[in-house]
Image: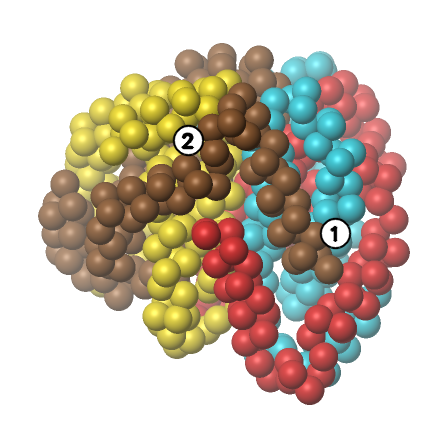
Chain colours: A cyan, B red, C brown, D yellow
Amino acid sequence: MVNTLLEFRRARDWEQFHTVRNVATALSVEAAELLEHFVWSSDEQASHILEEHRAAITAEVADIAILLAYLTHDLSIDLQAVVSEKITANERKYPLEKSYGSNKKYTDLRRLLNLLQTD
Amino acid sequence: MVNTLLEFRRARDWEQFHTVRNVATALSVEAAELLEHFVWSSDEQASHILEEHRAAITAEVADIAILLAYLTHDLSIDLQAVVSEKITANERKYPLEKSYGSNKKYTDLRRLLNLLQTD
Amino acid sequence: MVNTLLEFRRARDWEQFHTVRNVATALSVEAAELLEHFVWSSDEQASHILEEHRAAITAEVADIAILLAYLTHDLSIDLQAVVSEKITANERKYPLEKSYGSNKKYTDLRRLLNLLQTD
Amino acid sequence: MVNTLLEFRRARDWEQFHTVRNVATALSVEAAELLEHFVWSSDEQASHILEEHRAAITAEVADIAILLAYLTHDLSIDLQAVVSEKITANERKYPLEKSYGSNKKYTDLRRLLNLLQTD
């Protein structure tokens, strides 16, 4: 799959446009296009939207996956390895006894960081 | 890898927070955190930033990959298949003779759509 | 207010970093920081978060307003005028009888555009 | 202007869709639509795009301003006051002698925060 993507890009001489910054920008834009499907809905409506927009939502997910594949390739990232490390880090950060059934700790850490940032 | 992620989530009873809408929101937020590294830089500075921030940038890419993995699982998407379809669609949309060395057509299509949208 | 912002920027010789592209990128990043507060919450939790994070949320809104002020200035946009035009356009796009109590039409237009885009 | 926006919303019974979370999501999506204009361009191309897309870019800025106006109203934020506070805070955070002609300090603070976050 990655080879096909690289060949697609090479054949069009598009490597020149694929700076990491530009691919990161595109990824952010595609993520927003995914999010846009849910933009004015309540939690309850969101699940209906999911069904009605399934084809378009799936296409957005494909776009994100493609950009992530370029990014991972261009940065020579071993995705398997860094995701494993991240999971290990998250296990320390969210120990079972403190995080079971709660989205609180995460929120609190963010809040602390936000306070630091907005200081 | 996906199994470890699913187990991580199940063990914390976090499936309740992982609606598709919430995961899509998180993905958008993580994509912005990646982009943030390049926010005030010129093209030239961007490549230096890439080197200086490599560890943090790699960690953001891992976060995005994790959220994409959850999304793909929760939507029962066959990523291999939809990316293949997308590549085929993109080959039609960007024929070699019109798109070689140019980011123009893409931009023009967007422009048309933007005009429609802002009508 | 705008004058203070312009003076702040001029005094630091930061105009060179404030290309429209960079300010637009920063605005996108700040909007994500605002959104981040609600990232894993349900509709119900969102209103509690609103109270608990009020100071940080207000600070994010200020950041967005500052970037919008720079953007408006740098693009010589008459904000009052373009917002008026936009409201007029939206009144045509969402006539009362079709849009009362419904977020549907909007969604449907988007869907059509998404289908075109993902074609 | 704000009154016209509030009346537009009230007339359509759209207050129910305008939770702070939803407006923040919409703002994030609109910011991405603005950013999208510059997505694959170099710094040099960005200024041409600015001219060619001026009408659409202006319309995106109007959308962002409208959402910011709703947000500010709904959160009862005194924008003038919070922006003033923010400028004062930024003057402390970026003293002239350390920040003149440099986007470094900002980047370094972010880096530190990112390291904390990705720990």
Q: Earlier in the sequence, mark 2 or mark 1?
A: 1
Residue reaching furthest bottom? B97
Taking depth in this image into account, of A29 and A87 the one nearest to the observer is: A29
Mark 2 falls on what kind of element? Answer: helix
Decide: is C71 above or below D29: below
Decide: is B85 above or below C68: below
Residue A59 has which mark? 1
Q: Label 2 amino acid?
A: Asn
The quadrant of the picture occupied by the N terminus of chain C is top left
How far is mark 2 from mark 1, CA to CA?
34 Å
Which residue is the site of mark 2?
A114
Q: Residues within 10 Å of mark 2 (few under 14, many from 20)?
A: many
Q: Is residue B82 visible?
A: yes
Left or right of B60? Residue C15 is left
Provide residue A6's location: percent of width, then percent of height. 74, 73
Provide residue A18's location: percent of width, then percent of height. 59, 71
Judging from the image, mark 2 belongs to the subunit labelled A
Taking depth in this image into account, of B29 and D102 the one nearest to the observer is: B29
The quadrant of the picture occupied by the C terminus of chain C is bottom right
Left or right of A98? Residue B54 is left
Taking depth in this image into account, of C53 and C24 the one nearest to the observer is: C24
Q: Is residue C26 visible?
A: no
Residue D109 has which mark? none
Quadrant in the picture for residue A103:
top right
Q: Residues within 10 Å of mark 1 (few under 14, many from 20)?
A: many
Provide residue D48's location: percent of width, then percent of height. 38, 74
Mark 1 falls on what kind of element? Answer: helix
Q: Do callouts 2 and 1 mark residues in contact (Cβ within 8 Å)?
A: no
Provide residue D114's location: percent of width, then percent of height. 49, 44
Decide: is D12 above or below A20: above
